[in-house]
DNA sequence: ATTAATGTTCAGAA
DNA sequence: TTTCTGAACATTAA
């Protein structure tokens, strides 16, 4: 579930671990099918124990601990993963614990109810090979309007589907794609190659605006309550959604349109047919 | 019992 | 080559 704002909130929540030393890596006994840990937990532990956490980065929807040998420990929460410093929602879905010394909080936890996420370690070289060579596009908060337009202008895909392609731009997920296009007044089914430079500038600006505001509110916790910040608290941006999961409600922007739910690429899309006309 | 859910990736077809 | 579909991963709540 977490998209860029939720993962950024997790990252900010664990920033206090910077400068700390990793004392142990523990894959917790979890009765469910184990999450992906690569390399296997034993060898991974050998790589990281004794290392210092030099920096904590985010790339798209992943949190990265940058260690003092420039290797990376990557947490990818996918649908239900959480990176926490205390108080996991349940004990039985707790997957990984790192003991940390020299910081205010003594541990970092990875919790994952569905277990679709992963914890992976990359040497500096492996990391560059995987992620500088196009596995993920640039982060959505780290791309300028011109590069943004250049990325999308040539494809015939519907704009909402293209925004979800992490190889183009990393970080936008299903919820924020609908929110961004509503603020930009662009129809989600509009083919990318038909959009003007002006429209791309608007989409870029609205993308930054929506993502930054959502980060300020610490992300969206939906009805299932899964998403929590690093202290196991709810986000607040769900109270500011414009269209997501608001099918049948009156559009808050124009006051006239009724929010419609459609399906694109097997995923729900929400939009206002009055504000977001196809051209 | 069935369906859908904030994510990603792969195979196969058009 | 590009685009689209379905399935898979696993869990839970409606």
Image (cartoon, coloured by chain):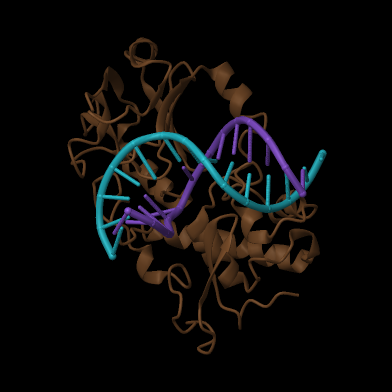
Chain colours: A brown, B purple, C cyan
Q: In the rendered view, tell whether residue A182 sits above or below residue A97.
A: below
Q: For this view, does C7 lie left or right of residue A93?
A: right
Specify whether A87 is left or right of A166.
left
Q: Is residue A192 visible?
A: yes
Q: Residue furthest bottom?
A: A256
Q: Quadrant of residue A223?
A: bottom left
Q: Is residue A59 visible?
A: no
The vertical placement of A266 against A33, above or below, is below
Residue A152, image x, y percentages: 73, 53
The front one of A112 and A218 is A112
Q: Position of residue A147 (x, y in %)?
A: 73, 49
User: Considering the image in quadrants, where does the C terminus of chain A appear?
Assistant: bottom right
Query: How many numbered discs?
Result: 0
In depth, the one of C4 and A171 nearer the eye is C4
Please tell me which residue is depicted at 40% across the width and 59% down the height of the picture: A216
Measured along the vertical axis of the image, is residue A278 above or below residue A105?
A: below
Q: Nearer the viewer, residue A266 or A187?
A: A266
Residue at horizontal 49%, vertical 82%? Answer: A251
Residue B12 appears at what percent x and percent y?
68, 35
The residue located at (34%, 60%) in the rendering is A222
């Amino acid at each position: 579930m977490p998209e860029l704002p939720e993962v950024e909130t997790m990252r900010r929540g664990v920033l206090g671990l910077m400068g700390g030393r990793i004392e142990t890596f523990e894959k917790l006994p979890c009765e469910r099918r184990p999450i992906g840990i690569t390399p296997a937990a034993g060898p991974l532990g050998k790589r990281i124990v004794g290392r210092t956490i030099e920096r904590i980065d985010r790339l798209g929807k992943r949190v990265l601990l940058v260690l003092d040998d420039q290797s990376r420990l990557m947490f990818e929460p996918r649908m239900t993963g959480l990176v926490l410093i205390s108080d996991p929602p349940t004990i039985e879905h707790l997957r990984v614990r790192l003991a940390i010394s020299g910081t205010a909080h003594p541990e970092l936890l990875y919790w994952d109810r569905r277990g679709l996420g992963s914890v992976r370690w990359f040497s500096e070289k492996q990391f560059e090979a995987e992620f500088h060579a196009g596995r993920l596009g640039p982060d959505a908060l780290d791309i300028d309007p011109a590069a943004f337009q250049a990325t999308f202008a040539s494809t015939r895909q519907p704009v909402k589907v293209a925004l979800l392609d992490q190889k183009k731009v990393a970080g936008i997920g299903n919820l924020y794609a609908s929110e961004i296009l509503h603020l930009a007044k662009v129809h989600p089914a509009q083919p990318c190659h038909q959009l003007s430079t002006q429209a791309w500038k608007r989409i870029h600006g609205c993308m930054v605006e929506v993502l930054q505001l959502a980060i300020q509110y610490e992300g969206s916790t939906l009805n299932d309550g899964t998403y929590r910040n690093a202290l196991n608290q709810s986000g607040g941006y769900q109270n500011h959604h414009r269209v997501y999961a608001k099918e049948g409600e009156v559009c808050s922007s124009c006051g006239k349109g009724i929010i419609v739910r459609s399906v694109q690429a097997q995923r729900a899309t929400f939009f206002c047919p009055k504000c977001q006309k196809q051209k």
